[in-house]
């Protein structure tokens, strides 16, 4: 009888012990999970801020114009290495830092507002295709002769006229005081299926050109190697690849979307489009974090025109000096 | 014998569970503190974004506030001295001298600023954020830190 009671007690003790063991192990698992979550969270934060430091570093280079000619400071080919100049303990650092100036400039411009495209000096090209407007049911042909007024133009349902101001500057750094700068304005008027070519070498400033336009945006081949989903296009040819250019697009009569494609011979080339994409990956321990940031570029040639006023005609400035003698006024 | 087994299992389970619970609690508190430290860094980024670089570094006199370099002091620094933190003064987040306590008991958060030695004024500052808290029952726990750079 005593043996039986002893067995029952022992069995009960073992069962209770197992129960306690299960509860304890579960509790430990939960707490270990909490610990791991905490560690992961901290490592993630360290990797994130290391990547953020890489973004800040690259942003400064873009804004200062000190990015390397290869347009990438550290490429992903060095993956696995930590940046030696940052976080000397080796605990965290960026492993990949890239600055990418992408593709073909695209965007939207309001009516009578201007958008300056600075393709930079790193890529040679000799022609550029400008495409604009994306709408259906348009009348693609503006009648020959003088331009209609704004109300008549709107009533006619035409795509916007595109004015392209082209600043040519010689090799070297852009200098707005350089007498070799050359400004050309081409006013490109929708003329249906006719035209579509602007010969830069034959372009007197302010001349009208015919833009090749159609009523729809169905894809169509416009020049070799390029399909378009825009209503209009014009190809500016005979640019000198030894020179550099700034393009300022200004739609008249209406807002428009636009796209520019640059060619070197028959090949499409990518040029900076005024925005740098910075891509940084960083590691802390075995945790990686990637941060991508887009930065509007300044400091290029386009910024040289920030304080320059230019016009098709003479510009008259009338300065009044407060408290001083009245100026002679315009015109001089 | 059954009583002995039960007692020893109960005792060891209690000890292990208590230890695990403490570890988990510490981890949770450290996560909370890391989040608060992150708020200081983001606040610093915001301060940089809304001020000139000179104001970010040295503050200004009217209205008067400190920059990240001029605010540094040794008061309350536990890891690196001098140090600073971001705080409300009176309604904007601005650099303030020394370290600051977090919401976790006996905790501290501090930011060390190392200006770029190669240029005057510095073109960037390295930022090291340290945070930690004392162990229960005394004794300093190992602090944690992460680094950023602000240009």
Image: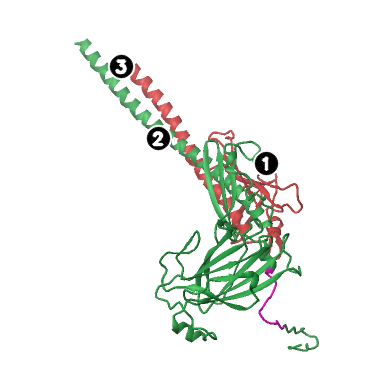
- Magenta stretch in the rendered image: A305-316
Looking at the image, which residue is at 62% across and 58% down?
B47
Please name the residue that numbered disc 2 is placed on: A30
Relative to the observer, which residue lies in front, A208 or B43?
A: A208
User: Judging from the image, what is the letter of the chain drawn in green?
Assistant: A
| A242 up-or-down from A73: above or below | below
- The alpha-carbon separation of the residues under discs 2 and 1 comes to 40 Å
Looking at the image, which residue is at 60% across and 70% down?
A199
Quarter holding the N terminus of chain A?
A: top left
Relative to the observer, which residue lies in front, A72 or A90?
A: A72
CB of mark 2 within 8 Å of CB of mark 3? no
Task: Find residue A312 and report its horizontal and vertical position in percent.
Answer: 66, 79
Please name the residue that numbered disc 3 is placed on: B2
User: Judging from the image, what is the letter of the chain drawn in red?
Assistant: B
Quarter holding the C terminus of chain A?
A: bottom right
Magenta part mainly helix, strand or loop?
A: loop
- The alpha-carbon separation of the residues under discs 1 and 3 comes to 64 Å
Single out the residue that lies furthest toward the left: A1
| A82 up-or-down from A249: above or below | above
């Amino acid at each position: 009888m005593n043996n039986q009671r002893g067995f029952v007690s022992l069995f009960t003790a073992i069962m209770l012990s197992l129960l306690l063991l299960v509860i304890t192990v579960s509790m430990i698992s939960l707490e270990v999970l909490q610990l791991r979550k905490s560690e992961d969270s901290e490592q993630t934060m360290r990797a994130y801020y290391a990547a953020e430091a890489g973004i800040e570093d690259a942003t400064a280079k873009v804004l200062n114009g000190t990015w390397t000619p290869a347009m990438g400071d550290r490429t992903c080919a060095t993956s696995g290495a930590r940046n030696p100049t940052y976080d000397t303990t080796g605990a965290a650092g960026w492993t990949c830092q890239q600055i990418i100036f992408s593709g073909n400039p695209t965007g939207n411009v309001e009516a009578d507002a201007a958008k300056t495209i600075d393709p930079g000096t790193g890529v040679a090209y000799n022609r550029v295709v400008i495409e604009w407007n994306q709408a259906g049911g348009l009348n693609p042909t503006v009648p020959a002769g003088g331009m209609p007024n704004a109300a008549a133009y709107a009533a006619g349902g035409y795509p916007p006229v595109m004015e392209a101001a082209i600043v040519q500057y010689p090799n070297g750094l852009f200098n707005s005081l350089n007498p070799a700068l050359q400004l050309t304005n081409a006013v490109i008027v929708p003329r249906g299926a006719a035209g579509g070519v602007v010969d830069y070498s034959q372009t007197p400033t302010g001349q009208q050109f015919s833009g090749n336009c159609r009523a729809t945006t169905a894809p169509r081949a416009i020049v070799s190697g390029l399909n378009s989903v825009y209503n209009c296009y014009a190809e500016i040819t005979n640019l000198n690849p030894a020179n550099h250019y700034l393009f300022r697009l200004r739609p008249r009569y209406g807002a428009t979307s636009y796209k520019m494609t640059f060619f070197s011979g028959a090949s499409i080339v990518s040029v900076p489009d005024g925005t740098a994409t910075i891509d940084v990956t960083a590691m802390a321990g075995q945790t990686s974090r990637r941060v991508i940031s887009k930065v509007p570029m300044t400091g290029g040639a386009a910024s040289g025109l920030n304080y320059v006023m230019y016009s098709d005609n003479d510009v008259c400035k009338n300065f009044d000096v407060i408290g001083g003698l009245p100026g002679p006024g315009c015109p001089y | 014998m059954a009583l002995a087994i039960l007692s020893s299992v109960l005792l060891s389970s209690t000890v292990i569970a208590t230890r695990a619970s403490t570890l988990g609690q510490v981890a949770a508190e450290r996560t909370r503190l890391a989040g608060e430290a992150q708020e200081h860094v983001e606040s610093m980024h915001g301060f940089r974004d809304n001020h000139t670089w000179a104001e970010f570094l040295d503050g200004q006199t009217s209205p008067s506030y400190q920059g990240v370099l001029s605010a540094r002091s040794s008061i309350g620094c536990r890891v690196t001295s001098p140090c600073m933190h971001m705080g409300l003064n009176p309604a904007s987040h601005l650099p303030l001298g020394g370290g600051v306590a977090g919401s976790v008991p006996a905790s501290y958060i501090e930011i060390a600023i190392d200006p770029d030695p190669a240029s005057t004024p510095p073109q960037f500052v390295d930022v090291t954020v340290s945070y930690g808290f004392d162990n229960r029952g005394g004794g300093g726990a190992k602090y944690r830190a992460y680094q950023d750079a602000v240009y």
